[in-house]
């Protein structure tokens, strides 16, 4: 999907119950896997409308919510204003093109890595931006046969990820305590009425 696609989809993004349910599962899994606390300065990459980030923000000190879609960020800003949230800051940024002069106690990224062609470069950028002792959490589709997205969807760079690839890559980048688990299964029904499940995995690790 292109940035424009996400801009157009932003206003109706939260209306798909499947997305809301998935985000809640990912947020709960991050929360139960990592020792979140109110001193943590966190960054979310590919925050969308904030479905995951706003669920975690009350457990954190601050959250910098990054995305490249102005439409998605506008939806998030609207929620921040209407819900009077004081510790979440939306930021338009492409980490593979621009620098960020900051380090974080936690970086998380949900359902975004499969949109990034240079996934391994982005994972390396995340690791650079972690303080010593900080945590990384990446949730995405487990590798699938390409049937998850509609045929006309653009911007889909990976048909999910092999869990072993993610574990090996993060360990190779120097993270410790790297582990992966299935946190949800998205059920999709095709035009012929057949349902199938697409597992979602969460990989986590610690710097140092
Ligand atoms: C499938 S949505 C997931 C949104 C949100 N994390 C959630 O779980 O509801 C993918 C998000 O990644 C963002 N995105 C795509 N390419 C990106 C990039 N290169 N850098 C940052 N964000 C990107 C899109 O704008 C979109 O908001």
Image (cartoon, helix red, strand yellow):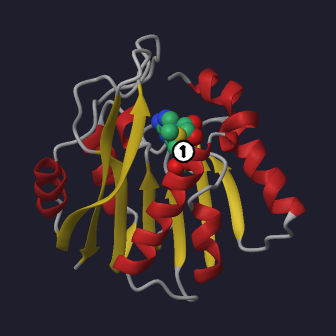
Q: Residue furthest front?
A: 193
Quarter assignment of residue 6: top right
The mark total stands at 1
Task: Look at the image and tell me whether residue 100 can be seen.
Answer: no
Residue 204 horizontal side relative to residue 49, left or right = left
Examine the rendered structure and indicate whether residue 197 appears above or below residue 84: above
On the image, the x and y values in percent for residue 151 come to 40, 12
Quarter of the image for the C terminus: give it.
Answer: bottom left
Name which residue lies at 31% across and 62% down.
Answer: 127
Q: Report the front residue among 105 and 195.
A: 195
Examine the rendered structure and indicate whether residue 73 appears above or below residue 31: above
Tell me the residue that label 1 is attached to: 18
Q: Report the front residue among 193 and 128.
A: 193
On the image, the x and y values in percent for residue 166 come to 19, 52
Residue 181 horizontal side relative to residue 55, left or right = left
Name which residue lies at 62% across and 73% down.
Answer: 57
Examine the rendered structure and indicate whether residue 183 appears above or below residue 156: below
Quarter assignment of residue 111: top left
Name which residue lies at 69% across and 55% down.
Answer: 90
Task: Look at the image and tell me whether residue 18 can be seen.
Answer: yes
On the image, the x and y values in percent for residue 29 come to 40, 70
On the image, the x and y values in percent for residue 152 come to 46, 11
Q: Report the front residue among 42 and 26.
A: 26
């Amino acid at each position: 999907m292109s940035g424009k696609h996400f801009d157009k989809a932003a206003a109706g993004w939260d209306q798909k119950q499947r997305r809301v349910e998935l985000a809640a599962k990912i947020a709960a899994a991050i929360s139960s896997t990592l020792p979140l606390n109110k001193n943590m300065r966190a960054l979310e990459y590919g925050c969308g409308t904030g479905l995951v980030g706003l669920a975690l923000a009350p457990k954190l000190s601050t959250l910098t919510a990054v995305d490249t879609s102005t439409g998605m960020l506008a939806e998030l800003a609207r929620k921040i204003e209407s819900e009077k949230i004081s510790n979440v800051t939306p930021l338009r940024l492409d980490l593979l093109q621009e620098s960020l002069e900051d380090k974080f106690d936690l970086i998380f990224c949900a359902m975004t890595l499969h949109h990034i062609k240079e996934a391994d470069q982005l994972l390396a950028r995340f690791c650079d931006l972690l303080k010593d002792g900080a945590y990384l959490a990446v949730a995405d589709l487990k590798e699938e046969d390409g049937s998850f997205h509609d045929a006309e969807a653009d911007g889909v760079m990976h048909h999910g990820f092999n869990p072993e690839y993610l574990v090996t890559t993060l360990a190779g980048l120097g993270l410790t305590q790297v582990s992966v688990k299935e946190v949800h299964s998205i059920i999709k029904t095709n035009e012929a009425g057949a349902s199938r499940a697409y597992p979602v995995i969460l990989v986590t690790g610690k710097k140092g």
